[in-house]
Image (cartoon, grey):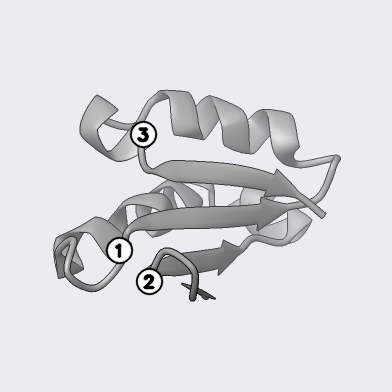
């Protein structure tokens, strides 16, 4: 995604309920992988999840390193 007003690119991860339940370690990895590309590629990451998966993903988000956690936003679909 791209914010034209602020000229920032955002990584977007869409996580299904099945993925969150079966592979939470992969969901956590997905919340961190964009950072390895460097800040020149992405300003932050938006993770889209269903209402049912939000609490579980929020728990994964809370376990992220602080420098990554600050730039990851969880959004409900």
Tell me the crowding category of disc 3: few under 14, some 14 to 19, or many 20 or more residues within 10 angstroms, Cα based: some
Mark 2 or mark 1: whose residue is earlier in sequence: 2
Q: Position of residue 68 (x, y in %)?
A: 28, 39
| Residue drawn at 60 percent across, 43 percent down | 74
Q: Position of residue 29 (x, y in %)?
A: 36, 53
Looking at the rendering, which quadrant does residue 37 occupy? bottom left
In the picture provided, is 66 more to the left or to the right than 51?
left
User: Which of 46/49 is in front?
Assistant: 46
In the picture provided, is 23 more to the left or to the right than 22?
left
Residue 34 is marked as 1
| Residue drawn at 35 percent across, 33 percent down | 70
Circle 2 is placed at which residue position? 7
| Residue drawn at 52 percent across, 67 percent down | 12
Mark 2 or mark 3: whose residue is earlier in sequence: 2
In the picture provided, is 41 more to the left or to the right than 14?
left
Mark 3 or mark 1: whose residue is earlier in sequence: 1
């Amino acid at each position: 995604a791209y914010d034209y007003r602020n000229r920032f690119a955002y990584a977007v991860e869409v996580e299904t309920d099945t993925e969150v339940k079966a592979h939470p370690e992969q969901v956590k990895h997905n919340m961190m992988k964009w950072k390895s590309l460097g800040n020149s590629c992405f300003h932050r990451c938006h993770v889209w999840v269903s209402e049912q998966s939000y609490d579980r993903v929020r728990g994964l988000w809370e376990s992220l390193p602080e420098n990554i956690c600050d730039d990851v936003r969880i959004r409900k679909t």
